[in-house]
Image (tube, rainbow, N blue to C red):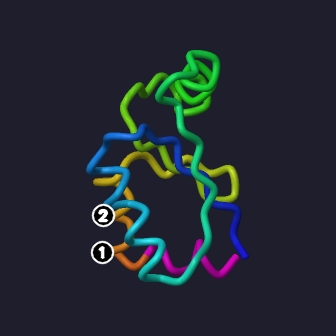
Amino acid sequence: MPDIEIYSTRVCPYCVRAKKLFERKGVAYREIDVSDDEALRDGMIARAGGKRTVPQIFINDQHIGGCDELYALDSKGGLDPLLKA
């Protein structure tokens, strides 16, 4: 099972959309809510190469990006191989 982490906030339609894609694919993920935690948010920003928006998605420690990047990866057929790792 892949290790999937999604940095999110409570009110984020893009976060919901990304989580729904993983749910449709039947894979579990760990959500890290950075809404009220500056240290977690700072860690996300550092880990994501300076990107400040949510979601920021990592699969097996590989930075995927946000929701748009996740869906683009899926449409190119690149997501499923990562989920089988």
Instruction: Look at mark 1 in the image and give the residue it sits on.
Output: 75
State yes or no: residue 81 in magenta. Answer: yes
Above or below for 27 versus 19: below
State yes or no: residue 65 in magenta. Answer: no
Q: Measured from the top left, where is residue 37 in percent x and y? A: 57, 21
**Mark 1 and mark 2: Cα distance apart in space:** 5 Å
- The circle drawn on residue 7 is none
Above or below for 19 versus 68: below
Q: Residue at x 68, y 50 (%)?
A: 61
Q: Main secondary structure of the magenta part?
A: helix
Q: Amino acid at mark 2?
A: Ala
Q: Measured from the top left, where is residue 8 in percent x and y? A: 46, 41
Q: Amino acid at mark 1?
A: Ser
Instruction: Tell me whether circle 1 and circle 2 mark residues in contact (CB < 8 Å).
Output: yes
Q: Start and end of the magenta stretch? A: 78-85
Location of the C terminus by quadrant is bottom right
Q: Left or right of 52: which side holds 3? A: right
Instruction: Look at mark 2 in the image and give the residue it sits on.
Output: 72
The local secondary structure at tag 1 comes to: helix
